[in-house]
Amino acid sequence: MIELVLTRHAKSDWGDPTLADHDRPLNARGRRDAPLMAQRLAEAGVVPQRIISSTAVRARTTAEEFGAALGVEAELDGDLYLASASGLLAAAVDSGSTSVMLFAHNPGITDLAFRLSNGGITHMPTCAVARFVWDLVSWAEAADVPADSWTLDTPR
Protein backbone atom coordinates (compact mmCIF):
# COMPACT_ATOMS: atom_id res chain seq x y z
CA MET A 1 0.00 0.00 0.00
CA ILE A 2 1.16 3.51 -0.89
CA GLU A 3 -0.27 6.40 1.12
CA LEU A 4 0.05 10.16 0.60
CA VAL A 5 -1.56 12.71 2.89
CA LEU A 6 -1.61 16.27 1.56
CA THR A 7 -2.26 19.08 4.00
CA ARG A 8 -2.50 22.72 3.10
CA HIS A 9 -1.11 24.97 5.81
CA ALA A 10 -3.60 26.46 8.27
CA LYS A 11 -4.91 30.01 7.84
CA SER A 12 -2.13 32.57 7.95
CA ASP A 13 -1.92 36.12 9.25
CA TRP A 14 -1.72 38.98 6.76
CA GLY A 15 -1.62 41.66 9.50
CA ASP A 16 2.03 42.69 9.16
CA PRO A 17 2.75 43.97 5.64
CA THR A 18 6.48 44.14 6.41
CA LEU A 19 6.75 40.36 6.72
CA ALA A 20 7.92 38.38 3.73
CA ASP A 21 5.38 35.83 2.48
CA HIS A 22 7.62 33.00 3.72
CA ASP A 23 7.55 34.40 7.27
CA ARG A 24 3.82 34.86 7.81
CA PRO A 25 2.59 33.09 10.97
CA LEU A 26 -0.79 31.45 11.59
CA ASN A 27 -3.68 33.69 12.56
CA ALA A 28 -6.16 32.86 15.35
CA ARG A 29 -8.24 30.60 13.09
CA GLY A 30 -5.11 28.78 11.92
CA ARG A 31 -3.94 28.24 15.51
CA ARG A 32 -7.40 26.78 16.26
CA ASP A 33 -7.74 24.63 13.14
CA ALA A 34 -4.29 22.98 13.06
CA PRO A 35 -4.61 21.07 16.36
CA LEU A 36 -8.26 20.26 15.60
CA MET A 37 -7.43 18.68 12.25
CA ALA A 38 -4.36 16.94 13.69
CA GLN A 39 -6.52 15.36 16.38
CA ARG A 40 -9.07 14.19 13.79
CA LEU A 41 -6.33 12.48 11.82
CA ALA A 42 -4.93 10.86 14.96
CA GLU A 43 -8.40 9.62 15.94
CA ALA A 44 -8.79 8.12 12.45
CA GLY A 45 -5.61 6.12 13.06
CA VAL A 46 -3.67 7.69 10.19
CA VAL A 47 0.00 7.87 11.15
CA PRO A 48 2.40 8.47 8.27
CA GLN A 49 5.97 7.20 8.41
CA ARG A 50 7.26 10.66 7.52
CA ILE A 51 5.96 14.23 7.76
CA ILE A 52 7.65 16.68 5.40
CA SER A 53 6.83 20.39 5.35
CA SER A 54 7.58 23.53 3.44
CA THR A 55 9.92 25.80 5.38
CA ALA A 56 7.38 28.65 5.39
CA VAL A 57 6.40 29.56 8.95
CA ARG A 58 2.69 28.88 8.37
CA ALA A 59 3.34 25.42 6.91
CA ARG A 60 6.02 24.50 9.43
CA THR A 61 3.81 25.50 12.37
CA THR A 62 0.90 23.47 10.97
CA ALA A 63 3.16 20.44 10.42
CA GLU A 64 4.52 20.67 13.96
CA GLU A 65 0.96 20.52 15.36
CA PHE A 66 0.25 17.38 13.34
CA GLY A 67 3.62 15.88 14.24
CA ALA A 68 2.92 16.34 17.94
CA ALA A 69 -0.54 14.75 17.64
CA LEU A 70 0.72 11.83 15.54
CA GLY A 71 4.04 11.24 17.27
CA VAL A 72 6.05 11.85 14.09
CA GLU A 73 8.71 14.55 13.90
CA ALA A 74 8.14 17.06 11.12
CA GLU A 75 11.00 17.44 8.64
CA LEU A 76 11.55 20.60 6.60
CA ASP A 77 12.13 20.79 2.85
CA GLY A 78 12.70 24.20 1.28
CA ASP A 79 11.70 22.83 -2.12
CA LEU A 80 8.09 22.45 -0.91
CA TYR A 81 7.66 26.23 -0.53
CA LEU A 82 5.30 27.15 -3.39
CA ALA A 83 6.09 23.85 -5.14
CA SER A 84 4.13 22.73 -8.18
CA ALA A 85 2.03 19.58 -8.18
CA SER A 86 4.89 17.73 -9.90
CA GLY A 87 7.37 19.01 -7.32
CA LEU A 88 5.17 17.87 -4.45
CA LEU A 89 4.69 14.42 -5.96
CA ALA A 90 8.44 14.14 -6.56
CA ALA A 91 9.05 14.90 -2.86
CA ALA A 92 6.72 12.04 -1.89
CA VAL A 93 8.34 9.65 -4.35
CA ASP A 94 11.84 10.67 -3.22
CA SER A 95 10.95 10.39 0.49
CA GLY A 96 11.92 6.72 0.64
CA SER A 97 8.66 6.03 2.47
CA THR A 98 5.47 4.30 1.40
CA SER A 99 3.46 6.53 3.77
CA VAL A 100 4.21 10.24 3.69
CA MET A 101 2.44 13.44 4.67
CA LEU A 102 3.27 16.72 2.95
CA PHE A 103 2.50 20.25 4.15
CA ALA A 104 2.50 22.83 1.40
CA HIS A 105 0.74 25.66 -0.43
CA ASN A 106 -1.68 26.50 -3.19
CA PRO A 107 -1.87 26.28 -6.12
CA GLY A 108 0.41 23.21 -6.15
CA ILE A 109 -1.36 21.29 -3.41
CA THR A 110 -4.81 21.73 -4.98
CA ASP A 111 -3.44 20.85 -8.40
CA LEU A 112 -1.96 17.61 -7.05
CA ALA A 113 -5.11 16.72 -5.08
CA PHE A 114 -7.18 17.30 -8.23
CA ARG A 115 -4.88 15.01 -10.22
CA LEU A 116 -4.71 12.22 -7.64
CA SER A 117 -8.48 12.28 -7.03
CA ASN A 118 -9.16 12.13 -10.78
CA GLY A 119 -10.85 15.54 -10.59
CA GLY A 120 -12.79 14.85 -7.40
CA ILE A 121 -11.00 17.48 -5.30
CA THR A 122 -11.24 20.91 -6.88
CA HIS A 123 -10.06 23.06 -3.95
CA MET A 124 -7.90 22.53 -0.87
CA PRO A 125 -8.92 25.20 1.64
CA THR A 126 -6.56 26.11 4.46
CA CYS A 127 -5.85 23.20 6.82
CA ALA A 128 -7.59 20.72 4.51
CA VAL A 129 -6.33 17.14 4.73
CA ALA A 130 -6.57 14.90 1.66
CA ARG A 131 -5.54 11.25 2.00
CA PHE A 132 -4.74 9.14 -1.05
CA VAL A 133 -4.20 5.37 -1.03
CA TRP A 134 -3.01 3.07 -3.79
CA ASP A 135 -3.23 -0.71 -3.62
CA LEU A 136 0.27 -0.87 -5.05
CA VAL A 137 3.69 -1.59 -3.56
CA SER A 138 5.87 1.16 -5.02
CA TRP A 139 5.79 4.81 -5.90
CA ALA A 140 7.04 3.88 -9.38
CA GLU A 141 3.58 2.41 -10.02
CA ALA A 142 1.52 4.89 -8.00
CA ALA A 143 3.04 8.17 -9.20
CA ASP A 144 1.47 7.98 -12.66
CA VAL A 145 -2.11 7.03 -11.79
CA PRO A 146 -4.94 8.46 -9.69
CA ALA A 147 -5.29 6.95 -6.22
CA ASP A 148 -7.48 3.89 -5.71
CA SER A 149 -9.24 5.72 -2.90
CA TRP A 150 -9.17 9.17 -1.38
CA THR A 151 -10.77 11.26 1.35
CA LEU A 152 -10.92 14.97 2.04
CA ASP A 153 -11.47 16.57 5.44
CA THR A 154 -11.68 20.30 6.13
CA PRO A 155 -12.01 22.24 9.36
CA ARG A 156 -15.37 23.69 8.36
Image: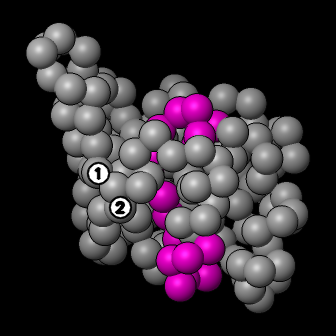
Indicate the quadrant containing the N terminus: top left, top right, bottom left or bottom right. Answer: bottom right
Q: In the image, residue 20 lies at what x, y percent? A: 20, 26
Q: In the image, residue 52 lies at what x, y percent? A: 40, 64
Residue stretch rendered in magenta on the structure: 93-110
Which residue sits at x=59%, y=45%?
A: 84
Residue sitting farthest toward the bottom: 137
How far is disc 2 from disc 1 in space, using C-alphas? 6 Å
**Residue 51 in sight:** yes
Mark 2 residue type? Asp
Q: Is residue 96 magenta?
A: yes
Q: Quadrant of residue 120?
A: top right
The answer to whether marks 2 and 1 mark residues whose Cβ atoms lie closer than 8 Å is yes
Q: SS at mark 1?
A: loop
Above or below, 69 against 7 in this view is: below
Which residue sits at x=24%, y=21%?
A: 13
Q: Which residue is mark 2?
A: 77
Q: Nearer the viewer, residue 93 or 69?
A: 93
Instruction: Answer left or right for 121 relative to 144.
Output: left
Q: Which residue is mark 1?
A: 55
Instruction: Answer left or right for 16 relative to 138.
Output: left
Crowd class of label 2 (few under 14; some 14 to 19; many from 20; radius 10 Å): some
Instruction: Answer left or right for 92 relative to 115.
Output: left
Q: Is residue 114 magenta?
A: no
Which residue sits at x=83%, y=65%?
A: 144
